[in-house]
Image: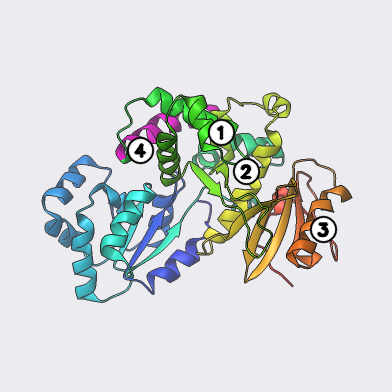
Amino acid sequence: MIERSISKTIIDMAKNFPVVTLTGPRQSGKSTLLKSCFTDYKYISLEDPDIRQLAENDPRGFLKDCGTKCIIDEAQRVPDLFSYLQTIVDSRDECGQFILSGSHNFLLMERISQSLAGRTGILKLFPFSAEELRAVDKLPNDLDEILLKGCYPRLYDKKVSAKEYFTSYLQTYVERDVRLLRNITDMAAFKRFLKLCAASVGSILNVASLAKDAGISVITANSWISILEASFILLRLPPYYKNFSKRVIKSPKIYFCDTGLLCNLLNIFNREQLQKSGLRGAIFENYVVTEYMKNALFKGEEPQLYFWRDTNQNEVDLLCETDGELNAIEIKSGETKNQKFYDGLKKFAEVAGIPLTNTRVVYGGDDSYLGENQKFISWKEITPIQNP
């Protein structure tokens, strides 16, 4: 098993909360992580129809059988369970009683807000980070390879191609999970909409345009975007417009939680297709954004990530607030360091009033360079930002 960076965070959280909740995409390694971190806990999965039926028919008896320490996987499958959980954790008044996990963020958070607010610590687990893969010498040496392959654990554990894996992933999980969240009758239109979102990766979200191209209403498009976010398929990167001129873009950008899944949706399956694609730069941008997101999530922090663009087309690809300080990041897929990459960062540093030490370029080269006022970070070495 590849050790996950979040392991210490989740163990520490169980010492401070009666319930710990772990969410994240399907197949991101939640069950494996929990079993390894809490070896003395009973493990129960509500994906099993027989166990789920027992929990639905006799929740009190089910929770009694769970004992005093239990992992309940896919907990959102039995919504009524949460009210009974509240009663039990309050009566025991102990930390680390239950570890819950689930892949439907909307359903899980809805139940937690109703019954377990203030009683549970919440964490998100995404697929492997580059840092985790590098620690066990499993990070691909080639940038195109990791963009095509993505970071889902099964691809590094089993001999399965990315094309085969993600085709199955979309059929087995996405379509089923979507139906659990919302009764979508036209699955063909939904798949078309999903591919249109993939083609818009790294772009400013234009819901009206996506709706028109997919042949659906704007209301439906907004609903489907929310479903994709709740299923940990798609994510929105908000704009940063604090304390700046009003002449800034205020719509989010869209990205995907994994570049392997993104490439599959774009029908990009090999290096030649990726190199010829006009979206390679956007796919690399997606990779970098999710790496910084994982760096925060695995420490138990909510990512404070944004982008900035004004109406004059001045732009910074990624802004990260760390320890109250703003950091600006330019993302370039090219393998050669270029001083021009810093032009936009210098302009933004002046506008935002931040020092150049709080700027960096993440690029497609293999070697990092950390100068006094310039930092070029290799795609292989994206680590949490620590300001001097």
Residue type at tag 1: Ala
User: Which labelled disc corresponds to residue 177?
Assistant: 4
The C terminus, quarter of image: bottom right
Q: For the point 41% across and 23% down, which residue is it?
A: 188
Are circles 4 and 1 on residues that touch, CB within 8 Å? Answer: no
Q: For the point 58% across and 24% down, which residue is it?
A: 267
Magenta residues span 163-180
Question: How many angstroms separate mark 2 from mark 1 (CA)?
Answer: 11 Å
**For the residues carrying marks 3 and 2, which lies nearer the camera in this image?**
3
Query: In the orientation shown, which residue stands out farthest toward the bottom?
Result: 93
Q: Earlier in the sequence, mark 4 or mark 2?
A: 4
**For the residues carrying marks 1 and 3, which lies nearer the camera in this image?**
3
Q: Earlier in the sequence, mark 3 or mark 4?
A: 4
Residue with the mark numbered 2: 286
Residue type at tag 3: Lys
Residue with the mark numbered 1: 198
- Compared with 320, 256 (above or below) is above
Badge 3: residue crowd in 10 Å (few <14, some 14–19, many ≥20): some
Can residue 26 be seen by looking at this rendering?
A: no
Question: How many angstroms separate mark 4 from mark 1 (CA)?
Answer: 19 Å
Residue in the foreground of this view, choosing between 222 and 93: 222
Question: How many angstroms separate mark 3 from mark 2 (CA)?
Answer: 23 Å
Residue type at tag 2: Asn
Q: Earlier in the sequence, mark 2 or mark 1?
A: 1
Secondary element under disc 2, as helix, strand or loop, is helix
**For the residues carrying marks 4 and 1, which lies nearer the camera in this image?**
1
Question: How many angstroms separate mark 1 from mark 3 (CA)?
Answer: 31 Å
From the top left corner, tell me how far across and down residue 358 is, in percent: 75, 65
Magenta stretch secondary structure, dominant: helix
